[in-house]
Image (spheres, rainbow, N blue to C red):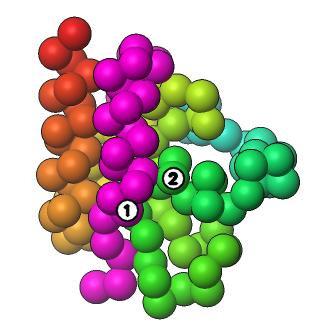
Amino acid sequence: MAVKLNGKALKQARKLIEDGKVERDVRDDWSEHAPSTDDENNFIDKHGFAAFAEWHLGRDDEKSDGTKGSVSFPFGDFKKVHRCAVISLEGRAAQYGHDDIRDAAKKLLELMDSD
């Protein structure tokens, strides 16, 4: 299994949540709230791919580094962590057997919901 937990992204997500940078939306909102391809490209142009990767809990070292295919399981819109994104990625991680990512998502949800 090539996809593994991106520790830097997890650390960033926790910090954002602790700082109150959370969108407390509902489960099915992610399809509407997810950044567009143009938003992603603009973010990469402005901040670089490493910063873009830190918005994704999954990392695939078997894919070409610096490509969108090398990251997965996005959790926010480059400003805030979206609860709907974390719920969505938790389900997909569980479905595909990425237990470390699923468990990290569960902990992020608990952190969001503890406020």
Q: Which residue is mark 2?
A: 54
- Looking at the rendered structure, which numbered label has been put on residue 28? none
Q: Quadrant of residue 6?
A: bottom left
Task: Please state the horizontal and vertical placement of residue 67, each as a whole percent of the image.
Answer: 67, 74
Q: Which residue is mark 1?
A: 6
Callout 1: SS: loop
Give the magenta part as a residue range: 1-29
- In the image, residue 1 sits, relative to residue 73, either above or below, namely below
Residue type highlighted by circle 1: Asn
Task: Say which residue appears at 18% left-offset and 41% top-offset.
Answer: 106
- In the image, residue 57 sits, relative to residue 28, either above or below, namely below
In magenta segment, residue 110: no
Residue type highlighted by circle 2: Glu
Callout 2: SS: loop
Q: Residue furthest top?
A: 115
Say left or right for 98 vs 8: left
